[in-house]
Image (cartoon, rainbow, N blue to C red):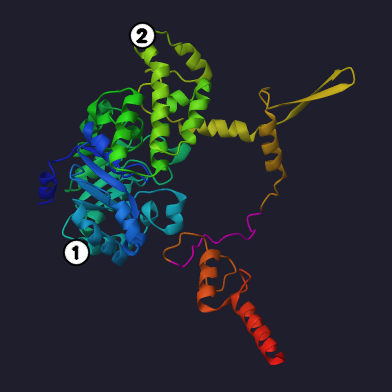
Amino acid sequence: MSYDWYNLLGRPRFVVAPMVDASELAWRLLCRRHGAHLCYTPMFHSNVFTKDPKYRKDSLQTCQEDRPLIVQFCGNNPDIMAAAAKLAEQHCDAIDINIGCPQSIAKRGKYGSYLQDDWELLQKIVSTMSKTVSIPITCKIRIFEDIEKSVKYALMLQEAGCKLLTVHGRTREQKGPLTGVASWKHIKAIREAVSIPIFANGNIQCLEDVYRCLECTKVDGIMSAEGILTNPALFEGINPLTWQMAQEYLDLVEKFPCPSSYIRGHLFKMFHKLFMLEDNNELRQLLATAQNINDFRQVCITIKEKYLHYHQGLKHFDNDEFIIRINFNLILPPWICQPYVRMSPEEHTKKMERHNKEQFRFICFQDENIHKRIHEDSDGNAISRKKMKKLRRIMRRPIKSENQPGRSGEICINEMCPNPLGSKCVYQLCKKCCKNKCYEENLDCEGHRILVYTKREMARKRVSENDDKT
């Protein structure tokens, strides 16, 4: 029974992940053309989705070719999450709950992976949503360091009503430069314990990785996020020309428009290796300031004209020069879609240690009556003037004591607002929400120094005094 609905979807194996500002309709259709079986929408905020019709309309942009489709929501209120799911159920094949986002904004809003410690609340969210809609409820999670706890976590969600689980094989702390390698061992243990379909997420940079993961973990499908952003044809098993993929994507954008920031982000990722070269700085700047579809197309055309001769073998591309400039040896030429390779956490840690231990030596050279001062780090490398100014600014900052008061980490009590609340606000609101409340309800807030009531009373007194005089 747990696989019936999954079989009706065609047992999808190649899955495009939910990505904020990145898995919009045009990108989903591009990935479907090149091998993807199932796509997720970007993460939507359930609270805003239920209250803002415009946000809801923009979020649910889809078409007939965009199926099967899973809509993902974040939030921490079971009733609001269920209401959002109800509004979306006619437009998709399943509803996903984001329990995997590790970003700081998720911590402030208490959603994503920051719900993974509150199992009772998660059970209520999953069960409430499952009872409210007629389509399956799925979850995307991260692992705990302990395999046994990760397995119990997955079993708890299954018992609460989750019909499909996507397991990202990294912990909540593995993000940014400390991302590191995902643990397929954890995913395999969860696969062996649960009876619902499982998708694996993590360490997928090419089609060979997909099949290795399927063989290692025995999961039902593979989800890709970062890998498919640099190569939308990843599931097709090819490495196409960057400008071909970019042009194909722009053709879809003309049919299914999206914000220019989404387009810019996708093109930057596809052209990432080329933009690492200094002689492409002008092209990089052109893309950064592009405002319409013609500007984006011009970037693609210019890159094609510049590198097509190299690709055809009519000109020789000096890969050694690329290695010297970038300090990285590419297997494929930089104009080919290929994975983004992160620095390992160990290398990043060493780099930060060197940075923190940086010492400054001032070597004075006397040439007649002129003294020239050169700044160097501990390795004897010259430090630029801009970097030196930044380091001096950091050194001037006072050292904060552990007991020094600061923000509490609490957020504004307005459910629509993710901002931190003012530490002295009498209404426990951020400054913007507090100002709106004071204007609407004729109040004062001494903490924010918003004196609407006082100023209005003073104005009334002046008016009454003028009336008495006349």
Please name whichever residue, 413 or 403, is drawn nearer the observer in this view of the structure.
413
- Residue 464 as seen in the image, left or right of residue 167: right
Q: Earlier in the sequence, mark 1 or mark 2?
A: 1
Q: Residue 298's spot in the image, x, y percent? A: 41, 28
Q: Residue 466's spot in the image, x, y percent? A: 69, 86
SS state under label 1: helix
Q: Is residue 231 visible?
A: no
Write the start and end of the magenta stretch as one range.
401-414
Mark 2, residue position: 313
The amino acid at mark 1 is Lys
Hey, which residue is sitting farthest front in the picture?
Answer: 470
Front tag of 1 and 2: 2
Asked whether the residues under the numbered discs 1 and 2 touch, taking CB atoms below 8 Å apart as contact, a structural biologist would say no
Q: In the displayed structure, would residue 151 be above or below residue 442?
A: above
Mark 2 neighbour class, 10 Å CA radius: few under 14, some 14 to 19, many 20 or more: few
Mark 1 neighbour class, 10 Å CA radius: few under 14, some 14 to 19, many 20 or more: few
Label annotation for residue 131? 1
Please name whichever residue, 460 or 327, is drawn nearer the observer in this view of the structure.
460
Q: Residue 285's spot in the image, x, y percent? A: 51, 31
Hey, which residue is sitting farthest right in the picture?
Answer: 369
Label annotation for residue 281? none
Please name whichever residue, 180 or 276, is drawn nearer the observer in this view of the structure.
276
Q: Examine the image and state in which quarter residue 339 appears.
A: top left
The amino acid at mark 2 is Gly
Q: Examine the image and state in which quarter residue 333 appears.
A: top left
Compute the Cα span from label 1 to label 2: 61 Å
SS state under label 2: loop
Judge whether residue 454 is colored magenta.
no
Q: Residue 275's spot in the image, x, y percent? A: 47, 26
